[in-house]
Amino acid sequence: MSLERARLGLLAALAATVPVSIFASQMLLALSLVVLLVRLLRRRTSLPRTPLDAPLLALVVWTLLAASFAAEPAVAHEESKKLLLFALFYLAVEGLSLAEDRERVLAAALLGGLALASFMLLQRYALGYDSLMRRPPGFLGHYMSASGVTMAILLLAVARLAIGPRARPRLIDLWLPAAVLVGVSAVALATAHGHGVPATRLFVAALAAAALSLALQRGARAQAAEAALPFAVVPVAAWALVVSQTRSAWIGVAAGLMALAALALLRAPRRLWAALAVGAALLLVSPGGIRSRLTVLDESSRDRYYMWQAGLDMVLERPVFGQGPGMVEVVYPRFRWPEAPNPLQPHLHNNVMQVAAERGLAGLVFFLWWVGVAFLAALREAQRAAASGRGPGWAAAGALAALSAVFVAGLFEYNLGDSEVLMLVLLLTAVPFAKTSDGAQA
């Protein structure tokens, strides 16, 4: 196998495993970086320069400085290891340069997202995750991580259906999502009988192998199966988000759909308007799980208000370098307002507040610089693709919708603190910066 084919296969396997296993996806990230390093040493490729280089470098350097000046530098530097995940952005920029490769990698992400969402539904209806205090986490460690990833995958699938190449899948083309659903059902059955861990590991390995194999195939059968994936992902992921009862994810999906609707003014795809109609119908029908969550007077909402007040106090105490990465949980009892319902908090449930409290006001500026450049790049490319009517432009539209959702949902959750969400964001952030072989953007 050539290094270029290994690069594509590993990147597709990585994209497929992000929604189901942080361990597997990070192992594949390490292997992908080794392949990239070998290719760089052999002068088979070069790292492209992007407008995100400066804000990323500034954010990394300031984070390390904030960790060094923290009250417990060892704890802060341990948390800072998550900065290594940003290498995925450059890996994806280099690996998504061909339109065909981009389609296969994003299809692999949809494959993993389908597995996550379907397992969430099985947990909800068959494994006892049926209350507000026990919500389905899917394959991930927490329901918030699962809902954040599912939110982004849903919007990517909607963009593929609404703006991508028109396709009418045949029943036989649905063999790939059917295989995923069978595998997930086997995991759920094994979990019910106390054998969930080995079954999950076997499933994750099979999913990674399937994504790698499909990415390297060139046949029409594989392409038809990939094109059929969004038709299965959209209904399954949408219902998984409903049963997750995660309000921030619902708000994020609304923001992402609004971004796609704005693009539809340039192209007006009927499928997008159909998706918006389905979303409106869900709100009108208002299942009990949704109706009961549409409030800001519950304990969770009040707790967020008071933890944000505590975050402001943290910033005021250390406005330059902040408390340090990973230190909010340590210092929160000292800053907690007496009216706050919960005495302990691992984070501040807001990306902006969390970054400011951890890394100071300068760190917040660098973070917003990175977010702004990434979002504007996705917006410009999505607008360009929509105006020209290019089918491949669905990838940029999907990236725009997903980023919109993550950043808006991040006003109520520290979703970028989840490695799974961050890795998916970095993969999608790379889409507008990936150059095709003729020099045009994705």
Image: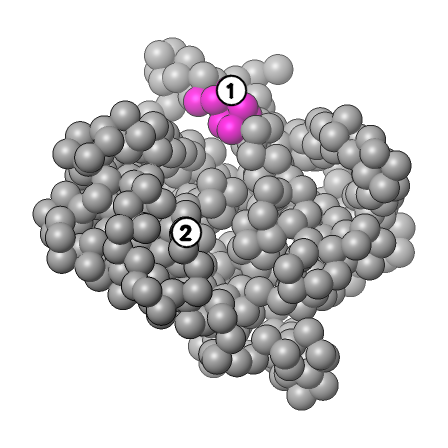
Within-10-Å neighbours for mark 2: few <14, some 14–19, many 20+? some
Report the disc number at residue 283.
none
Q: Main secondary structure of the magenta part?
A: helix
Question: Which residue is label 2 attached to?
Answer: 344
- The foreground one among 422 and 348 is 348
How many marks the image carries: the answer is 2
Let me know if residue 215 appears in the view: no
- The foreground one among 185 and 179 is 185
Magenta region includes residue 32: yes
Q: CA distance from mark 1 to mark 2?
A: 38 Å
Question: Which residue is label 1 attached to?
Answer: 31
Q: Is residue 362 above or below residue 289?
A: above
Where does the image place residue 396, in percent across and percent down from the top left? 46, 57
- The foreground one among 313 and 390 is 313
Q: Is residue 209 left or right of residue 72?
A: right
| Three-letter amino acid code of the residue under disc 2 | Leu
Magenta region includes residue 384: no
| Three-letter amino acid code of the residue under disc 1 | Leu
Q: Which residues are magenta?
A: 26-33
Where does the image place residue 187, in percent across and percent down from the top left? 81, 38
Q: Which mark is nearer the camera, 1 or 2? A: 2
At numbered mark 1, what does the secondary structure look like: helix, strand or loop?
Answer: helix
Work out which quarter of the rendered image holds the N terminus and state it.
top right
Q: Is residue 433 left or right of residue 367?
A: right
Which residue: 47% across, 34% down?
95
Tell me where residue 339 sits by quadrant. bottom left
Q: Is residue 287 left or right of residue 354?
A: right
